[in-house]
Amino acid sequence: MFQKLRSLVVKSSAAHAGGHGDEPHVLPLSTYFAVFGSLLVLTVLTVVVSVIGLPQPASIIVAMVVAMIKASLVVLWFMHLKFDDRFYSLIFVISLLFLVLFFAFTSFDLLTRGQVNPEESTFSQDGSLLRHEFMKK
Amino acid sequence: MESNRNNAPQSAHAATAGGSEPNYINAHKGIWSWMTTVDHKRLGLMYLVGVLGFFAVGGIFALLVRTQLLGPIFKGASGKQEWLFSGDTYNKLFTLHGAVMVFLVIIPSIPASLGNFFLPLMLGAKDVAFPKLNLMSFYVYILGGAFLLFSIATGAIDTGWTFYTPYSTTTSASVISAVTGVFILGFSSILTGVNFIVTIHKMRAPGLTWTRLPLFVWAQYATSLIQVLATPVLAITLMLLAIEKTMGVGIFDPKLGGDPVLFQHFFWFYSHPAVYIMILPAFGVISEIITVNSRKQIFGYKAIAMSSVAIAVIGFLVWGHHMFTSGQSELASAVFSFLTFAVAVPTAIKVFSWVATMYGGSLRLNSAMWYGLAFLFLFTIGGLTGLFLGTLSVDIHLHDTYFVVAHFHYVMMGGTMTAFVGALHHWWPKMTGRMLNEFWGKISCFFVFTGFNLTFFSQFLLGTKGMPRRYATYLPEFQTWHQLSTLGSYLLGLGFFITLCYMIQSLISGAKAPRNPWGARSLEWETDSPPIEHNFHVQPVVKHGPYEFPEIDHSMSTGGGH
Amino acid sequence: MTQPSSSHASSAGHHHPKYLAHHFESMAQQNASGKLGMWLFLGQEVLFFSGLFLAYVLARIIYPETFLAAHELLDWKLGALNTIFLLTSSLTMALAVRGAQVNSKPQMFYNILATLVLGGAFMVVKYIEYSHKFHDGLLPGHFFDATKAMHNGQLANIPGAPAIFFAIYFVMTGTHGLHVLIGMGLMVWLLVRIKRGDFNSENHVYLENVGLYWHIVDLIWIFLFPLLYLVR
């Protein structure tokens, strides 16, 4: 794993190498239209799923999975990440990892509050906004 | 001397100057040539002036705070007799001290000034990758600073540098302009980070492999990673704060249905890694100073380089240790506490490696090295007391006391600022072409070291006795320690004032500096002092590691790989 | 630039075009640097928006009913229309970059123009949506006006904190819209430079970088659309 990462870094930064392969990689037009077509189909799919109204957890999961597929299509083909220097992918993935980290720790705190002292599960002075009332559902 | 392909233009320059080639300072004349310069060395120098100026401002605030604490506020016959400042003024003073020192001094101190100046030189490059962007980040920095100063002029802020909600969204102080200033400063930080990472990746001289980079460069690399990945979260946090304050949105304010702890998550997701933005460059500086002045291959090159990156990554996992007592869930606190201990490992690797580097070396105790040794002592105390605070149960007692204040001053001030001043002593000859006065350098270091310990060690004691931070007054039994602390702060101020004096003296009448006064091996020492406009006469080609000093007996060398 | 960049025309004899900055050795190095810088900037953008998405997630955890009820007040048809505008603009942007790769000035110009127009169409739809919300009093924070919404036939008895939902809606779409506007500004600049003949197959990293930026703006919308308009 470390070796692989290292080779990524070293490869991407062959400084002053001159002829490092950054020649444009021209994709055929058909590829762009195929990607665009898939994006439209997925958009329709996500709307249809919402209108049908799947039950609660499934609905959001499907919506997010579809959005992620769409995002990957844009990133891999329109943004050329599939054909470009792998180090760019590494940067992008690292930024996503930190995003996940941010989400994970913060929601972890929110979801585990009040387990030792139940009164800590509320944060508002206004009784109508007690957190645990919403958390129970 | 391997190649002469760059000789043609430079000899053309030289011809116009009549013999010797002009350096970066006198290559172009006039204020306009400075204001529009894209030369990383000039920008580094301009940042340096800016940072030192704000350091003086922040320092004056600190001295005022300490002066207030010479005596507690006693209720007089009139019922209200205050010593020096009112409580409100005091709140503004410590807030401004914190905000100025964090956002305008420590964060840009080493990266923006010395990093800008030396990174391309150390890499054997002509400039950073994006010189115009570099100029832009400088102006963004100045603009951000102007906003902060504007907020001081229009009534100042009294929230503490952390801008905690809901106080910050409800106070009448000029929070918006201060927050806008910090928001803008963040962009300067991000752009500098992007610039440095690209420079390190793409601009290295032939032969300068990743394992031949000076450790200062590695430290800058790790710092830049944090700047790019963490600072945007601060930006969005402050934006939400400003929106909450103007529109009463209620994301953070419990009265409106929001969650105040959420603000602290947002804030510390940036601000804890920011601690490493502040300290990592100092680690880089110390790796240079100690190794060059020990005349020995550094111990554990790879370990030090990798621990910088490890600190940068693990530093993102521990922000919750600022929130142990703020209503965060107990389980989350326990996890954050555990992870906090993990940061100590790569940090300790560095400290042990520096000590091992000195062991058996032939130490040269110049003033830069004095500052380097002061760093080792002060930072070790700062780091170890961090472990006390990372311990959940101990933190409940010590949270928001002077113990915390002393801890982070030992790290930020005793660590970063000591290293920064040490770095100025180390690289001053290269930057200005003049030598500093060694005798006065050691005198000032003595005052700084003694004054610092007097100021902040007494605060450790105050903290353990329960003196809370950010109070304008205190119970009479704390007075002795407070007065000792104030006395120390004056000594500290005196030490820095002496430094300022002999730096000015050096600019006027200092001895001319040779190319390489300390016998270092990294590339910045291979060009003139001060460097020429395009850094090197010929494109340097690197054939050795940064610390392979000629006098090292290689058959005996046990240092880590180069 | 204070230095004459032509002064470094090297005696080593390798190709040294006029658009190669003085401090780079080759076009490959210059292009790779520009692109690496852009990708780092995009990483920064991801984390910038992460804060908004996190605020969304936590508010939704705390007020699930609010989100279910309040999203009914957003018109998913307009949202879907905007999604199609942005996806198409992403296609034309990608085609513009391809135009640069094959050295075709008209392909660059008209595709960027199309992207600009589609971006404009997105903003027009956004304007229509915003003005409806303003009219109905569905505004963030203090400005949320339940009686006005009721009066205008909107569902106003939303449980929990509707002001927070609309705060998040406006902040997220507003920040995104600001990015679209910045992108449109960059595209005007691109059009000028294309007309001037600045870009060719060897030198188009600026065009490519604006493209990358535009795609990330599209990417964020891909997530905003289901999260705000299609909550179930």
Image: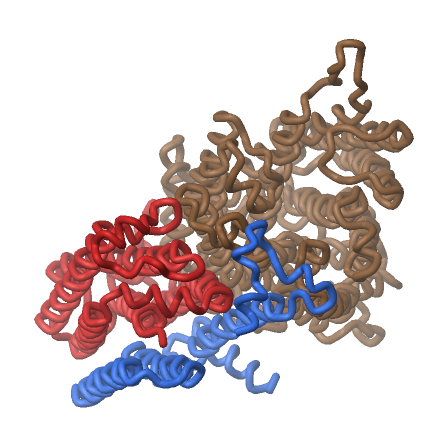
Chain colours: A blue, B brown, C red
Q: Quadrant of residue C205?
A: bottom left
What residue is at 58 percent from the left and 72 percent from the top? B210
The percent position of residue B399, horizontal first and vertical second, equals 77, 50
Looking at the image, which residue is at 75% across and 59% down? B291
- In this rendering, position of residue B186 left or right of residue B52: left
In the depicted structure, whether residue B129 falls above or below residue C31: above
Among the 4 quarters of the image, the one containing residue C32:
bottom left
Q: Residue furthest top?
A: B77
* Residue B2: percent from left, percent from top: 51, 67
| Nearer to us in this view, A56 or B49 | A56
Q: Quadrant of the C terminus of chain C?
A: bottom left
Who's the residue at 79% across and 17% down the image? B75
The answer to whether residue B414 shows anywhere in this view is no
> Which sits in the foreground, A7 or B407?
B407
Q: In this view of the protein, which residue sits in the foreground, B448 or A95? A: A95
Q: In front here: C46 or C176?
A: C176
Circle count: 0
In the image, residue B382 lies at what x, y percent? 79, 52
**B239 left or right of B295?**
left
Q: Is residue A97 left or right of residue B215?
A: left
- Give the side of residue C31 with respect to residue B283, left or right: left
